[in-house]
Amino acid sequence: MEFAEPLAFLLALLAVPLLLLLVRHPRHGYLVASTTAVRALPRTLRQRAARALPLLRVAAVILLVVAIARPRVGEAETVVPGQGIDIALSFDVSSSMKTGEFGSGKNRLVASKEVIREFIRARENDRIGVVVFQRDALPLSPPTLDYAALDRIIADVDSGIMPDGTGIGVGLASALNMLRDSTAASRIVILLTDGQHNVPSISPEEAANLAKSLRIRVYTIGILSSESEESTFEVDEPRLQAIAEMTGGRYFPAQNQAALADVYAEIGRLETSAVGRERFERYTEYAPWFLGAAAALMAVDLVLRATWLRRGPA
């Protein structure tokens, strides 16, 4: 319980002089030579009630002050709007991703999985789906808020779960299909690869046109070979850049794990949910109960003084 107007308790100090005034108020009676004869007489119920009567007014004042302070119990409620960002992560797991040193002694696949898992942990209220591709594409999870489950799925991903190859077009198309029926305010695909499209399936351009018609932005990431690394393959950067530009996204190159982490962080900043949380408070007010109790005590006081505890004439 809390009080909306806690300073109102200063008014409770009024009860102190009121109590003193009532206690010290001169009582009417008769002058007698001595009270010794009547002291031994037992007090009647009426006499005891009369002595306690001032406490009713003091209690009424205290209850009135509590009512003015507005005691209440708040119930915090948070509404998360149904619209936000739906993200499909599509990344290459071809055999070439297990070669090369991509930072801290890790190959491209291991380092990329670490960065992707960190990206997922940094999101909030955005549904994320996962697709991996080689020659074909394999959806691993539809868009979900269960980030812990996604983390376990990506941690277990390895190369060789499909025929080898680099199907950029089918990897993108599978991610688009995952977002096709989404009603989110923003839908994006983040596609990562270290090679060139080299399989006879849907072409990257056809998939990009599909993304454009669905109004889904595509961010592409190219894993580049380091300067000291001898490689028989190179990323098709012009193609990845064209896919991104066609859909309103951006292309990012990355040459090591730190650079890749920066890329995902930059995409995270670009794609911050435009619809945040709406927070409001609902309270149950208890002031009327205290006000009613104070009024009841005052009414009892007036009735008793006018009837049973009425004093005789001076």
Image (tube, helix red, strand yellow):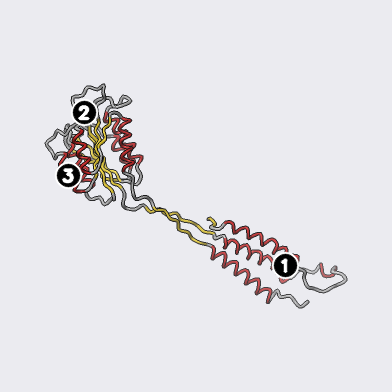
The residue at which mark 2 appears reads as 96
Q: For the residue labelled by badge 1, is the local secondary structure a helix, a strand or a loop?
A: helix
Residue 51: which disc?
1
**Pointers 2 and 1 in contact (C-beta within 8 Å):** no
Residue 298 is left or right of residue 207, and the answer is right
The residue sitting at 22% across, 22% down in the picture is 230
The residue at which mark 3 appears reads as 209
**Pointers 1 and 3 in contact (C-beta within 8 Å):** no
Residue 256 is left or right of residue 241, and the answer is right
Residue 266 is left or right of residue 177, and the answer is right
Label 2 vs 1, first from the N-terminus: 1
Q: Residues within 10 Å of mark 2 (few under 14, many from 20)?
A: many
Q: Amino acid at mark 3?
A: Asn
Q: CA distance from mark 2 to mark 3?
A: 27 Å
Q: Of circles 1 and 3, which is in front?
A: 3
Residue 250 is situated, as x and y percent measured from the top left of the image, at 25, 39
